[in-house]
Image (tube, rainbow, N blue to C red):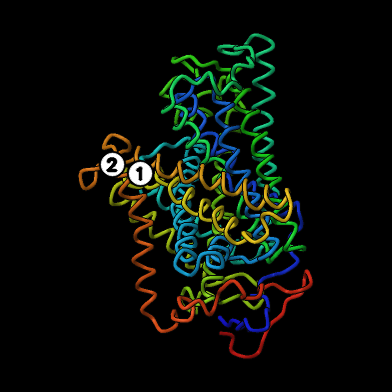
Amino acid sequence: MTTTPIDLSRGEGKGLAAGTLGLWGSTVIGLASTAPVYSLVATLGFVVLAVGAQAPIAFIIAFVPMLFIAFAYRELNRDVPDCGTTFTWATKAFGPWVGWMGGWGVAVAGMVVLANLAQIASVYFWALLGQEFENNDWRIILVAVAFIAAMTWVSWRGVEIGEKIQNLLLAIQYGALALFVVAAFVQFFTGTAPNPTPFDWEWLNPFAIGSWSGFTEAVLLALFIYWGWDTCLALNEETKDPKRIPGAAALLTCVLLLITYVGVTVAAMMYAGLGEGGTGLGNEANADDFFLAIKDGLLGPFGWVLVVAVLISAVSSTQTTILPTARGTLAMGVYRALPERFKGVHPRYRTPSFATLVMGIVASLYYIGMTLISDNILQDSIASLGLAIAFYYAITGYACVWYFRAELFRSAGAFLVKGLMPLLGALMLTYAFVQSAVDMWAVDYGNTVLLGIGGTFVVGIGSLLFGVVLMVLWFLFPRAKRFFRGESLNRDTPVLVPDEPGEVIRSVDGGI
């Protein structure tokens, strides 16, 4: 495999397929990254258990920090449309050490969620065939790794083919959700729903939530289902207008997700009610997969459609989750924050070939290893995912405020979108991080106990601390010196994207 070096001193692009994605393509990939169907399946029941009828308002409140951080991403991207996103922006704002850890947060979140998505896709694949196995069964593992391999190939093959596949997969997901909502409302209005519950405006009253701990738990759960929209920004160098389209796509994605999640939640509550028995949303037995519990009663012989939708959702997100991590590590390779191999770009497909393949291999090994050691530990690592998400989103919010600090008081608009909203979003996520860590410390939080404390805490915080170890080790290598001295990437480093959309600039001299 041959790659083309990039000359950073001339402000050239990294060799990615510039000018490939428009606003719709970026939005589709952002939506696919969140896996809307699977996210609802995995979260809705637990949110209802936490706050009962206030589930819709919990999703709305969780949307607020996501929206604020989306504005931070948009403003930073307008000034620095670099595929390194959090890594690049945090380095420019706070220096190499914080920037490196921001990039590590993105990588950890991607790796852990890939293992989860692949396993879910495999479980639902076998469920579609009428088979049910334990999560650590070799057949589950084999198909899960096959899904990771297939989606890695799609990501390696190019953004354009990935966009076409995602259009189809997203259409299937939203078709299934639309069918769910329509069927739920029809049965509610005809009186055939198992527990028809009229809509109540009190569902949107945050002050009706009786428990602060329940409210906090619900919001933290809801944060997870919005995560993934930032993939739009990781593909900024491959859009037709790098400074405008990614930020607009991120905001549009967030709004569409809000409408989707609140709409489906209201429909589910009106159809099944909040009872603790049968198909009620308050039934703990249904919490981990509400769709499976109601599919036959809701859709009859077409209940398999919901199974297919969850399968498609997980597979779709598997592919799009690889994209931001591969591009983030590509940027880290370009700026000497990782070994030189990571900056390799495929000469034909113009994708971060080495970084993409590494992501697929590492995710597969992580999934296999954790599953064989203990499926409980794998599940705890997934439960700790919110820590990595809150970590790098908060860093991005703080970076926006500090990067634009000289511009904040030039206008009310600048103060709002570059200062106040990113800061509030970052503070909210910092609180979410701290509160999550405190909750995860308890031995009864997850499925395991490690070192005498909750295994979820150990895995979540441990994975971030492992990044510190790797960063220090990389600091010892000669190639890393220019990065950690602030020479290869700093506030004044030029934006490494082509000046004209669609233009790909390659240098013939040695890069950095």
Vertical placement of residue 325 versus 226, above or below:
below
Label 2: which secondary element = strand
- Crowding around mark 2 (Cα neighbors within 10 Å: few <14, some 14 to 19, many 20+) is many
Kind of residue indicated by mark 2: Gly
Q: Is residue 151 left or right of residue 376?
A: right
Q: Which residue is mark 1?
A: 380
Q: Amino acid at mark 1?
A: Asp
Residue in the foreground of this view, choosing between 487 and 267: 487
Query: Residue 323 appears at what percent x and percent y?
Result: 58, 60
Q: Quadrant of residue 509?
A: bottom right
Label at residue 454: 2
Where's the C terminus, which quadrant? bottom right
The residue lying at 69 percent from left, 17 percent from top is 186
| Nearest to viewer (mark 2 / mark 1) | 2
Q: How many marks?
A: 2
User: Which residue corresponds to the image point at 54% horizontal and 23% vertical from the top-left?
Assistant: 294
Q: Earlier in the sequence, mark 2 or mark 1?
A: 1
- Front residue of 399/286: it is 399
Q: Are marks 2 and 1 in contact (CB under 8 Å)?
A: yes
426 relative to 335, above or below: above
Q: Residue at x 73, y 74 (%)?
A: 498
* Left or right of 286, for residue 138: left
The crowding category of the residue bearing disc 1, from other C-alpha atoms within 10 Å (few below 14, some 14 to 19, many at least 20), is many
Hey, which residue is sitting farthest left in the picture?
452
